[in-house]
Amino acid sequence: MLLYTIARILFFVFNRALFEATSIADFTYLLLASLRFDLSAVLYTNMLFMALMLLPFRFRYNTGYQKLLKYIFIVTNSIALAANLIDIVYYRFTLRRTTWSVLQEFANENGSVLASSFIVDFWYIPLLWFLLLGFMVWLYNKVKVQSPPRVSSWLYYPGHMALMGLTVFLAIAGMRGGFAHSTRPITLSNAGEYVKRPNEMYLVLNTPFSMLRTIGKNNYSKVNYFTEQQLDAIYSPIHIPATTTTFQKKNVVIIVLESFGKEAMGSYNPGRLGKNGYQTFTPFLDKLMQDSKVYWHSFANGKKSIDALPSILTSIPSIQEPFVLTPYASNNLPSLPRTLHAEGYHTAFFHGAPNGSMGFKAFMNLIGVKEYYGKDEYNNDADFDGMWGIWDEEFLQFTAEKLNKFPEPFMGTVFTLSSHHPYKVPERYKGKLAIGPLPLFQGINYTDMALQKFFEKASKMPWYNNTLFVITADHAGSPRHYPEYNTDWGAFAAPILFYAPGDTAFKGREQRVVQQLDIMPTILSYLNYNKPFFSFGKSMLDTTAQDFAVSYNAGVYQWIEGNLLLQFDGNKTIALYNYQQDQMLKQDLKDKLPQKRQQLETRVKAFIQQYNNRMIENKLQVERN
């Protein structure tokens, strides 16, 4: 318990910039609240040790047996301690405690390479682990187990059986979080009972608890806020296009950029340019945006790469856990590639990583993508970056060449990877790229340059002017440098732009809210698709559609609509902010704007009901009569 507390203090200290609103007094209270979750985790992780220690036999006092118990205690608790310490760094990338899904997410990655890179870049974490491990061993050695005075077996065995029963009862209560029969075992959401702000849940929780409580969990349950008739009137994922215009078979190329947060893009920060040394790291994208359709308030629906593709290609967000790791990934999914394939499109996906990486190949197969191009198909390890895959510059050139061989119309999706930790760039570019306050920005500058070369090549190809390009990010960059981008809205701020070189009228900037979920319906609308389809997003070409962006953060639903950000825990509003005027989210308006709060609550409830119930019932398609 002491080591968990020390690890939590270190977690807070090392990530202080991400908890600016949390005072020392607040944190002290959270330390006390965290004991409930720490006790549960300690009891779970030490079940084997306790069981062997409590066996009511006299041989447990033997030296050899006690040595075995010592090794079991040290090994199990050193693993738990390592998980807590690793999250000191990993939290900066995900802004949540690591759950069991991370093991599935990286199951196909090269673990030894990732581990060695982590140890080199964040050397102080292994150092802290060794120091605390030594402290744990020293404390353990202070405890001396001695055989009790010899007593009659008639007293010894019944007495120790009773002691074991009492200990088991207390341990179960500690694991569950309470003694009452009606008490449900505590889970991650219980941390919300003690916090003022959603992200403070991660100061209450610990990583072993977060992982143990998410093993094989189905987090969705049916809700019935509204009747079906009321529900569809408030919000419906069924889209009935009103167009009678002929479907236009333009090519579609979706480019998903790794970790491209808005803070690195000068176009999204015009007030910063030239001030305090700020420079753009995306000069090409800044220029391209001038000829593109840009919706200013654009957001990712998740914080991880694995969240992005379902949002973009199926219009399904990740709620609570990455969608592809839930049991519902096997549902009959809506799919942009499958929809366009039915209209005669050739479909393909490009990702320069090893082909099993992130489970992308399996997901592409699941949603009907016909061809997959990864590191294996590139087939030239001379361009391998040594960790993640093929450098963006070379792989984007490869992508352009492959697209040029496809029959039209085609749909291609490419996912870049170079702007990812450890943010390496090819040797030939070292010292030639903008670096900035974070290593990530150099990686973004490199990928922006690679993207420029891709468009230079593609612009000379015959299909170019008959193509709609959609450029977005998988998630906002992590870590982030500027304060407003470390807020609950800034953590999801990501670019989304539509570029059609052969359609000069399709450009301009609109002050509307857009999200990754809107990409699929917007593409279909642009192509004049006239059949009913399923999408949790909306077409941005429909001026009557209600603007919104949804995400799930620290156990709380975030609903952005207009200039307001609502945080809702499933039962009540946690906070309401005007995120455009109050970028640091310091003024909670939930009591000052009760009517507006009620309107937003109604809509987010309708979304939750549609999402949960349709997932459980496998109703993610338009029902055909």
Image: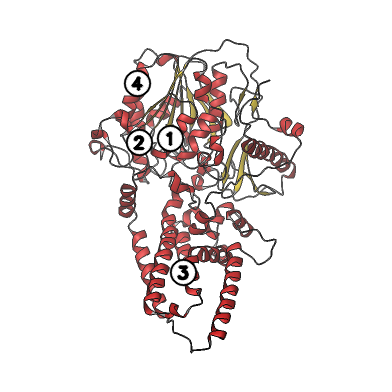
Image depth: mark 3 or mark 2 in front:
3
Amino acid type for the residue under numbered disc 3? Phe
Q: CA distance from mark 4 to mark 2?
A: 17 Å
Judge depth for marks 1 and 3 and give the one in front. 3
Distance in Å between CA atoms under marks 4 and 3: 57 Å
Q: Residue at x 53, y 88 (%)?
A: 152
Query: How many discs mark residues in the rendered view?
Result: 4
Residue positioned 36% across, 32% down in the render: 448
**Is residue 472 at all visible to an observer of this figure?**
no
Sooner in the amino-acid sequence: mark 4 or mark 2: 2
Q: Which residue does the numbered mark 4 point to in the structure image?
A: 402
Looking at the image, residue 408 lies above or below residue 614: above
Disc 1 secondary structure class: helix
250 versus 64 height, above or below: above
At x 47%, y 54%, the residue is: 17
Residues at marks 1 and 3, CA–CA distance in whole angstroms: 40 Å
Kindly indicate whether the residue at mark 2 contacts the one at mark 1 (C-beta within 8 angstroms).
yes
Distance in Å between CA atoms under marks 1 and 2 = 10 Å
Which of the labelled discs sits on residue 49, or is there none? 3
Q: Which residue is mark 2?
A: 353
The foreground one among 349 and 201 is 349
- Which comes sooner in the sequence, label 1 or label 2? 2
Badge 2 density bin: few <14, some 14–19, many ≥20, Cα 10 Å: many
Mark 1–mark 4 Cα distance, whole angstroms, equals 19 Å
In percent of width and height, residue 472 lies at 46, 31
> Can you say whether 62 is above or below 378 in the image?
below
Q: List the residue tagged with mark 1.
A: 360
The percent coordinates of residue 482 (x first, y second) are: 46, 46
Circles 4 and 3: CB distance less than 8 Å?
no
The quarter of the displayed image where residue 158 is located: bottom right
Give amino acid for label 2. Answer: Ala
